[in-house]
Image (tube, coloured by chain):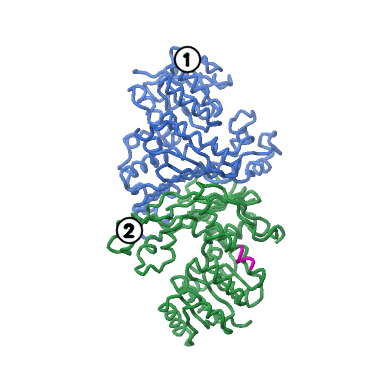
Chain colours: A blue, B green
Amino acid sequence: MEIVRFGVIGYGQRGCGLLDNLLLMDDVVITAVCDKYEDRSEKAKARVIEKRNASPFASTDYKEILKRDDVDAVLIATDWEMHFPIAIDAMKAGKAVALEVGGAYCIEDCFELVKTWEETKVPFMFMENCCYNREEMLVTEMAKQGKFGKIVYCSGSYSHDLRGEVATGKENRHYRLRNYLNRNCENYPTHELGPIAKILGINRGNRMVSLVSVASMACGMEQYVNDRRDTVNPELIGAKWAQGDIVNTIITCENGETILIRLDTTLPRSYSREFTVRGTKGMYEQQTNSVFFDGQAEYWNPTDFVKNYMNSAEKFKDLLPDCWKNITKEQLDAGHGGMDYIEFREFVTCLKEGKEMPIDVYDAASWMCVSCLSEKSIKEGGAPQAIPDFTNGAYKTR
Amino acid sequence: MEIVRFGVIGYGQRGCGLLDNLLLMDDVVITAVCDKYEDRSEKAKARVIEKRNASPFASTDYKEILKRDDVDAVLIATDWEMHFPIAIDAMKAGKAVALEVGGAYCIEDCFELVKTWEETKVPFMFMENCCYNREEMLVTEMAKQGKFGKIVYCSGSYSHDLRGEVATGKENRHYRLRNYLNRNCENYPTHELGPIAKILGINRGNRMVSLVSVASMACGMEQYVNDRRDTVNPELIGAKWAQGDIVNTIITCENGETILIRLDTTLPRSYSREFTVRGTKGMYEQQTNSVFFDGQAEYWNPTDFVKNYMNSAEKFKDLLPDCWKNITKEQLDAGHGGMDYIEFREFVTCLKEGKEMPIDVYDAASWMCVSCLSEKSIKEGGAPQAIPDFTNGAYKTR
């Protein structure tokens, strides 16, 4: 395959950014676009025409995209609820799948995704962009080289104030809105869990065996709406929100490591993923972008010390992979500081060269299932939930 | 009472520091000292003679201290295991109790402590010094004034690399050693939980209702010992350690808030308590000593911004209580940056003036019971444990 012909399904905020990333690639053409809202599918079409001077097929029905012979691969960036159905239908139609992230609504969906891939063996990649972020890639390489010793514990969060996004959409189109009104769980686990799973070898010699999840009360959205009655979606005034403001989930791995992840999206704060790696020889802490190694003085102030090159992860930037060493300004500007471009480049390259996808269907299933299992744990007062082994034992030797 | 006559029980590292704090106070005399090791009780006696030119009674049996008429109050700073028995005996002997912190080994001890106090009504204070630290006191006052809105979530940790302390004592005297060898739990919850409980009104309108606790593997101590075979206690070479390196505990409160605490003492790191307060209007984060309020820009770098007065908690230093505004250099230097002096000053003042103790037996029981409940939760794979209401319903109106 010299050129990858894409169908883009879903043209909300995320689809817009990702289409632009694909349009940067010489070996990609966009042959079809789709969104269930016609204004959006037309907007996607217009964007392709603007950039490439070629008109893609446009539809509001994703099944029309899957029928087409001029589509090799689909990017799925729809609402979370449609991720599984479309990905499964796409694999059955023989279309390679780049699946945007989200969480699962039920464990059966995760098994179905895996089963479909095992039956079809269609190339599938779960597009967790944070696995391709600069800091995460650098620290993953440091961990691989043993700089932190044996890794014992990792933590991270999706700390992103989404109140405005959830409360101000006038059209009620945003999938997050209905989730926050009706559901209480770790609804978006993979930005922090993905890089951690890579470091801990999840599904490759290790696996996640159980989790507990506990949610705080939900009052951030209510306060936000009350304080901004003139600007929010008026239907939300007086609404009751199901989603707890802070959800902590602790995952235990078969090899004894634990992982803490936190959903933190409805209280005022600055953005952070708080990616943290702890080993017997050292640690990395994203919140201060600092490293600390065994033998350093116990008392130091990370906010002062991180200014010092000695304690900044930047000291190790020579370990960055080539994709980061050689990144261009255009790629950096294409979305989320460059990681979106790098991950889609990876997908396209693997697809063209017939290589194994770096984040596969087993990763997708095991990372996404955290959402529905956390929902159950929260309902049961924090009771532990077993995490299935979607590889059916193969993780031991993969 | 014009002068408080103290018996100091326990003269390990903590007892040494606290005796020096008491010796700074004009309205305190030390009439008796005790440690089960005679060299230590003699050392305590010598310290009092050196500073006060008066010789206290010295014994290796704490019961001898409790029998004395010239002792009004005891400071208990022994190994954790003896905290409850000595505190209970002291109250029965009519001696006011200043109980150094630690965790409980069984829930029955906690109930017995409360019952003894209810029967004797002897003044009792749980000496959680972190409740008196500058940052914690400032942020507690900010929370009280509503600067963070409704508080939804708090977190903190006891992040303190104790490997050297645990592994290098040649005499096996350190109580932590036997705990780390034989026990797996949140063994020291109160440094972070105390200030959080104060902010959330625990036992005063609110209470902690349940917890889940999950421990990582234990390999930090083993690595430390292996790396330093020449300097550690030789008996520890090849030892198996029970205590997981990282223990996360999530507590749910009756009013819907959640609390995350972390024990983090056997992997290399810098000291931190990571005290964090999250509300509907703002947040405080100790790791960067930063505040953030609703309406600020979403993307900022706390490590840069904290240098800016706007985002530093220092902006609010006028809210500090007088004890911090008026603190002297001598008091600051007396231990843990001043908080030890302030908390003991509080105990002595309340005792002399017959005031209610600010951290009472109900606080002690509910904070300390986290240790034994976490041990049970860890054993049961993270299963939720009910936290008793030691106030028997009185928390609703206290």
- Please determine whether, in this image, residue A256 is positioned above or below residue A53: below
Q: Residue at x 45, y 15 (%)?
A: A54
Q: Quadrant of residue B94?
A: bottom right
Amino acid type at image mark 1 = Ser
Say which element carries label 1: loop
The C terminus of chain A lies in quadrant:
top left
Q: Where does residue B235 sit, x and y in percent of width and height?
A: 33, 63
Q: Where does residue A182 sit, x and y in percent of width and height?
A: 64, 35
Magenta range? B111-115
- Please determine whether, in this image, residue B333 is positioned above or below residue B296: below
Residue A231 magenta-drawn?
A: no
Protein chain holding label 1: A
The one of B85 and A210 positioned closer to us in this rendering: B85
**Label 2 neighbourhood size at 10 Å, few (<14), some (14-19), many (20+)?**
many
Question: Which numbered tag is attached to residue A55?
Answer: 1
Question: Which numbered tag is attached to residue B225?
Answer: 2
Q: Is residue A189 visible?
A: yes
Protein chain holding label 2: B
Dominant secondary structure of the magenta stretch? helix
Q: Where does residue A291 sit, x and y in percent of width and height?
A: 37, 50
The one of B157 and B75 positioned closer to us in this rendering: B75
Mark 2 and mark 1 in contact (Cβ < 8 Å)? no
